[in-house]
Image (spheres, grey):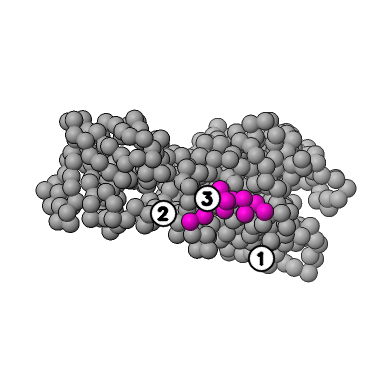
């Protein structure tokens, strides 16, 4: 199969298929990877799903797959082993050693409900052992119901179930020690409380339940509700170290209102981030997230078109402001590895990052003891850099960002380290003149670090690039700084790992120049 897609969706349940439908109708090339184990597979029927009331859950998925046949959507079985970064992509590795490449990833892989280890409980799961009264309460209304509490959250479930039956028994051992007020509150509506731990559920699955407790008591019920420990299926993302959110239900991927994670190309929807979401909520959240994913890709398509077009009539400040303002975020938010490697060996002082963009390098320097300043001609980029620094807990004295041209900086201010990382522009920009100007701001014994693209990507047609790729030696020649004033500390080509669009490993080449300003002679 072809291995390049606009979007890969992990999970073929209601959320995953809903996202695929929206993206397929947006003319996107989509792959859905389905492990074949939806959370609600244990239930014979689903409820509260408008237009599908009482339909078996697997029937809904079958209908959804059939609807996808009209679009450029492929559904395949498989298990995801890992997800990693590529150049403007994510790479998805499957258990059969298949490696897929996508511009965006939607995680809709769901959760498992790890039930209490009580004999007889798992055999009835989805039938007479239930968890959601909105999904199954109507079918057992007025019957003999129980609540097997597993945590303090069980108090909420206990109060909720009273709406469906006045014959309710709550097994309170999972709640911990109850206050007199909590006991009185439940008993005020006729709820029976049993404090002895449940040891077993007896009886054939089709018969009423006999609940046995540690003190030898037997309680006859028609159905019992409980909440298992929610275990999200997101382990394949572990290497990316995405931000997580802790709540009473457990630890889940942190997402914004669109489902976007802390990774710029990964969204997560459905039960994998919200264990309380039913089918309609999961379907809606996935559809909304898919729309946002498509918009991000639309914006990126325009950004690429603009960057590959010559715009001599556009001033650099207008070009870069439009570039940043037209997208939620351009860069990854991670520090340039060369800056981190070299700065780690220097004594922290004052630093200046030229063309700082959204501030990742300057923020890293500030976190590592530097008094960092970033400058960029885009006001939008600077606003994002300031917001990121604030979120990182940095003061303005630690990380200062300025929207200006380099010529607007104070001539009397010098810096122990001046950096310019991938300081390139598709519109006319006097790059060499600006870098020479930046050198004037380096203090005695301070350093100037320039990192640039040393060669086109190995998968690209070099003849299609108008960009002038400079080796480190070429960079030194372009700068033409006086040997009397500067020592060359490093002038080298560095290689860093990447993933080509076809999913194969590749190497990118960077040019690195590190200069040190000499002490002035008497």
Residue sitting at the far right: 463
Marks 2/3: CA–CA distance: 12 Å
Quadrant, the N terminus:
top right
Task: Residue 47: give x, y in percent of width and height.
Answer: 45, 56
Residue sitting at the far left: 180
Asked whether, in this view, residue 57 is left or right of residue 492, the answer is left
Task: Residue 492: give x, y in percent of width and height.
Answer: 73, 33
Q: Is residue 137 visible?
A: yes
**Secondary element type, mark 2:** helix
**Secondary element type, mark 3:** helix
Q: Earlier in the sequence, mark 1 or mark 2?
A: 2
Determine the residue positioned at 27% across, 49% down.
144
Q: Nearer the viewer, residue 289 or 158?
A: 158
Task: Residue 180: give x, y in percent of width and height.
Answer: 11, 48
Q: Which residue is mark 1?
A: 322
Determine the residue positioned at 31% across, 45% down.
222
Q: Earlier in the sequence, mark 1 or mark 3?
A: 3
Marks 1/2: CA–CA distance: 48 Å
Marks 1/3: CA–CA distance: 47 Å
**Secondary element type, mark 1:** helix
Q: Is residue 106 visible?
A: no
Asked whether, in this view, residue 413 is left or right of residue 205, the answer is right
Task: Say above or below: 182 vs 319.
Answer: above
The mark found on residue 522 in the picture is none
Q: Which residue is mark 3?
A: 57
Disc 3 residue crowd, few under 14, some 14–19, many 20+, Cα 10 Å = many
Residues at marks 2 and 3 touching, judged by CB atoms closer than 8 Å? no
Q: Which residue is mark 2?
A: 135
Q: Earlier in the sequence, mark 2 or mark 3?
A: 3
Task: Say above or below: 100 vs 387.
Answer: above
Looking at the rendering, the stretch of residues picked out in magenta corresponds to 54-66
Quadrant, the C terminus:
top right
């Amino acid at each position: 199969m072809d291995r390049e897609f606009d979007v890969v969706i992990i999970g073929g349940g209601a959320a995953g298929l809903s996202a695929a439908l929206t993206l397929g109708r947006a003319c996107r090339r989509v792959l859905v990877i389905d492990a074949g184990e939806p959370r609600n597979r244990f239930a014979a029927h689903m409820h509260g799903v408008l237009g599908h009331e009482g339909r078996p859950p697997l029937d809904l998925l079958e209908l959804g797959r059939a609807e996808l046949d009209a679009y450029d959507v492929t559904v395949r079985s498989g298990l995801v082993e890992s997800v990693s970064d590529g150049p403007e992509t994510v790479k998805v590795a499957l258990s059969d050693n298949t490696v897929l490449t996508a511009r965006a990833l939607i995680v809709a892989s769901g959760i498992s409900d790890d039930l209490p280890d009580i004999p007889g409980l798992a055999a009835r799961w989805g039938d007479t052992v239930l968890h959601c009264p909105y999904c199954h309460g109507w079918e057992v209304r007025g019957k003999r119901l129980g609540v097997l509490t597993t945590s303090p959250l069980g108090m909420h479930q206990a109060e909720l179930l009273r709406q469906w039956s006045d014959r309710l028994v709550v097994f309170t051992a999972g709640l911990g020690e109850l206050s007199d007020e909590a006991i009185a509150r439940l008993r005020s509506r006729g709820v029976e409380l049993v404090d002895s731990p449940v040891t077993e559920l007896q009886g054939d699955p089709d018969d009423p339940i006999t609940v046995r407790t540690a003190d030898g008591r037997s309680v006859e019920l028609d159905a019992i509700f409980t909440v298992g420990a929610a275990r999200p299926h997101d382990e394949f993302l572990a290497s990316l170290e995405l931000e997580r959110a802790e709540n009473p239900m457990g630890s889940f991927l942190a997402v914004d209102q669109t489902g976007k994670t802390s990774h710029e190309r990964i969204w997560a929807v459905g039960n994998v981030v919200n264990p309380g979401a039913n089918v309609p909520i999961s379907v809606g959240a996935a559809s909304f997230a898919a729309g946002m994913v498509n918009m991000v890709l639309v914006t990126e398509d325009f950004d690429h078109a603009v960057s590959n077009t010559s715009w001599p009539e556009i001033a650099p400040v207008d070009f870069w402001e439009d570039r940043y303002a037209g997208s939620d975020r351009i860069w990854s938010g991670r520090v340039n590895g060369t800056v981190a490697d070299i700065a780690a060996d220097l004594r922290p002082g004052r630093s200046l990052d030229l063309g700082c963009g959204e501030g990742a390098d300057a923020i890293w320097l500030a976190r590592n003891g530097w008094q960092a300043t970033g400058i960029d001609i885009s006001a939008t980029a600077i606003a994002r850099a300031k917001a990121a620094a604030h979120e990182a807990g940095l003061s303005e004295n630690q990380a200062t960002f300025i929207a200006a041209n380099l010529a607007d900086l104070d001539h009397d201010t010098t810096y122990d380290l001046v950096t310019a990382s991938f300081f390139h522009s598709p519109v006319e920009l006097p790059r060499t003149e600006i870098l020479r100007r930046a050198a004037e701001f380096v203090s005695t014994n301070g350093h100037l670090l320039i990192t640039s693209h040393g060669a086109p990507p190995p998968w690209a047609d070099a003849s299609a690039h108008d960009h002038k790729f400079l080796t480190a030696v070429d960079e030194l020649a372009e700068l033409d700084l006086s040997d009397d004033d500067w020592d060359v500390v490093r002038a080298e080509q560095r290689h860093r790992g990447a993933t080509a669009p076809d999913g194969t490993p590749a190497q990118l080449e960077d040019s690195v120049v590190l200069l040190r300003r000499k002490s002035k002679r008497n």
